[in-house]
Amino acid sequence: AVKRPMIEAPFGEVAPTAAGESGEASPSATSAKAGAAEEPSKSTTNENVSIFGKNAAGEFTSLSKDGISHIFETFDRDGDGKWSLGDWDSFQVALGEPAFSAEGNDLETLCDMLGAEQRSGKTDCEALVKYYGAMFEENANCLAENLSALKLVGPDGKSLVPSKPKSGTSKIRESSGRGARSGSDALAMGDKIEARAGGGPKFYPGMISAVRGGDKYDIAYDDGDKEQEVKRLRIKRPGEKQKREIPVGTHVEARFGGGKQYFEGTIMKDNGDGTFEIKYNDGDVEKAVKRPMIEAPFEAAAAAAGGAGDSARVDASPKPAAFGAVASESNLNKARFSVGDKVKGRYGGGPDFFNGKITAVRAGPNGPLYDIRYGDGDSEKDVNQFRVMQPGLKQKRALQVGERVEARFDAAKGGQKWFDGTVIKENEDGTFDVRYDDGDIEKYVPRNCIFGNWH
């Protein structure tokens, strides 16, 4: 039994005074009404504030909630209905603000600041609602300004731009747990498709053979090859094309530096000249990427009229070895490790080795591949031979022409990514020329930027 004076509830109108009960307004009430008539409240001085603002009870209007949800869907890159720290960073950067992580904050810190909850390293839309609740204390027009900056409102500055289904951004996964998304861009077993085999630039015809979690699919190509866990961005239905315009916040793959290798990232800005600014998942930013260098979600040919279809040509010829060659049993015979062997692995292809154990061995197109369970519980599949070593072994100094290696591309300019390739020349200064599997050739690669065989 809580006494009424101990409770704070929403406020109502001032109780009528004796004068009010007799039908006469008190002088103070009259002057207050007069003042309101002469000076409009802050919520009506800017029309957008009342539209994308709060009501008299201090709650977000229904359109404000729709606007916040619209922003949330735009930056929900993997379409699971939750934001990771990377999604929060993309949201901030798109607004011209420093990324949360760039200021040394993690998701736990952000949630503490907002009074929000996180689950499995992600937050739901309620955290963004609380974010704007805090922002309103400083700027009552912040939501309207943000929606305008992100081009999520129409020319009138009032109506929201209609949502369009985007791969990995605007559809929350179904509760079936299979990872398939609702909506027209979800694929099913037996669907005829065309896919960029091995992540290369060309499309090859095939059929969906399995639906995986995480918006990935297994593909049986028409030439007999098979590929597992292919990302949705690399698959299109026959007749679909790339659209010319890509909204800010769209998850894409792009050919960094105009090369042949695709990397995942997020559209941060449409430059208006046919190029786009992209922030890659590894943190690199490229300011002016031409539209043909970008693979975005596809749409039906009729809807994509005038789109950038040049990058989506289908090639019916056999795929090159680097893009999904049939695994050779002879490669499996070259395996140096067996299931149960204790090894050190370069997790994620980085430079550092971590203790682990081999859990599976399989044949790959260019040598044996290993599955590893690391000492901290993490697992990794299809790790190539250059990323696995037996404790105590070292890299040999000499490399032979024709030897398969993994090299750090463009290391002289700070490159941090490792790519498979073949040594094609040993130079007199101790460096090597490497031809990468995507066809690029790099000369004078230092020995300490190459992983070859171990001894």
Image (cartoon, rainbow, N blue to C red):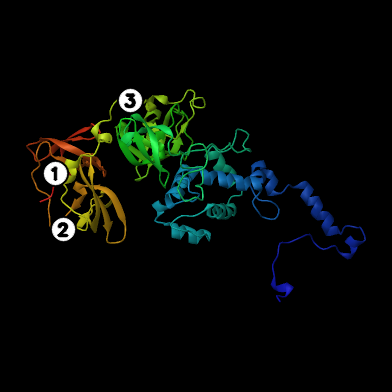
Q: As drawn, which residue projects farthest toward the top? A: 306
Amino acid carrying mark 3 in the image: Ala
Q: Are marks 1 and 3 in contact (CB under 8 Å)?
A: no
Q: Is residue 128 visible to us here? A: yes
Judged by depth in the image, the label closer to the viewer, 2 or 3, is: 3
Q: Quadrant of residue 409?
A: top left
Left or right: where 388 falls relative to 182: left
Residue 216 position in % (x across, y down): 40, 43
Q: Which residue is mark 2?
A: 391
Residue situated furthest left in the rendering: 428
The answer to whether marks 2 and 3 mark residues whose Cβ atoms lie closer than 8 Å is no
Q: Which mark is residue 447?
A: 1
Mark 2 vs mark 1, foreground winner is: 2
Helix, strand or loop under label 3: loop
5 with respect to 226 (left or right): right
Q: In this picture, is 180 found above or below 304?
A: below
| Mark positioned earlier in the residue sequence (2 or 1) | 2
Residue holding disc 3: 316
Which residue is rendered at x = 43% and y = 52% of the image? 85
Residue under the image location 45 percent in, 45 percent down? 78
In this rendering, the answer to whether 112 lies above or below 71 is: below
| Amino acid on which disc 1 is placed | Arg
Q: Is residue 405 visible?
A: no
- Give the spatial CA distance, label 1 vs label 3: 39 Å
Q: Nearer the viewer, residue 1 or 360?
A: 360
User: Could you say which is closer to the camera, residue 274 or residue 81?
Assistant: 81
